Amino acid sequence: MRSTFKILFYVKRNAIKKDGTVPIFCRITINGTIAHFSCRLFVNPMQWDVKNGQVIGNDSTSRRINTELNKIR
């Protein structure tokens, strides 16, 4: 039997806060079993790179969020 492991970061675009940011969620799949959780991080939806699952930009906030996502990964 072949085992699989996948991790995906995504933003929940329908949960916009008053400041215009959206939460980042993580989905982990192991052998077809899915678990979701919030990363407790928020980002401007225009700065989110769907393909790479990280924040676009080189400012301090973007680097901090990407570092936190790498720690989770």
Image (cartoon, rainbow, N blue to C red):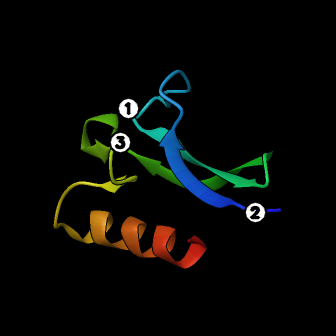
Identify the residue at horizontal 41%, vertical 38% (top origin). 21
Q: Which residue is depicted at the point 56% across and 26% down?
A: 15
Alpha-carbon span between mark 2 and mark 3 = 28 Å
Between label 1 and label 3, give the one nearer the viewer.
3
Q: Find disc 3 in the rendering and name its residue.
A: 50
Which of the marked residues, 2 or 3, is nearer the chain's N terminus? 2
Query: 19 left or right of 11?
Result: left
Residue at image location 16% in from the left, 67% down from the top? 58
Q: Could you say where residue 63 lies in the image, as x and y percent from the top left? A: 30, 71
* Residue 2 marker: 2
User: What crowding class fits label 2: few (fewer than 14 Cα within 10 Å), some (14-19), or many (20 or more)?
Assistant: few
Using the image as rendered, state which of residue 4 and residue 49 is in the foreground. 4
Q: Quadrant of the C terminus?
A: bottom right
**Up/down of 13 relative to 62, above or below:** above
Badge 1 or badge 3: first in the primary sequence: 1
Q: Which amino acid does label 3 sit on?
A: Val
**Relative to 65, does residue 28 appear above or below in the rendering?**
above
Give x and y (percent) for residue 18. 46, 29
Circle 1: is it few (<14), some (14-19), or many (20+) Cα within 10 Å? Answer: few
- Please name the amino acid that badge 2 sits on: Arg
Q: How far apart, in angstroms, are the residues tagged by discs 1 and 3?
A: 18 Å
Q: Mark 1 points at which residue?
A: 20
Instruction: Determine the image quadrant of residue 62.
Output: bottom left
As drawn, the label of residue 10 is: none
Residue furthest to the left: 58
The three-letter amino acid code for the residue at tag 1 is: Gly
User: Residue extending furthest top?
Assistant: 14
Q: Which of marks 1 and 2 is nearer the N terminus?
A: 2
Residue 52 % position (x, y): 33, 54
Circle 1/circle 3 CB separation < 8 Å: no
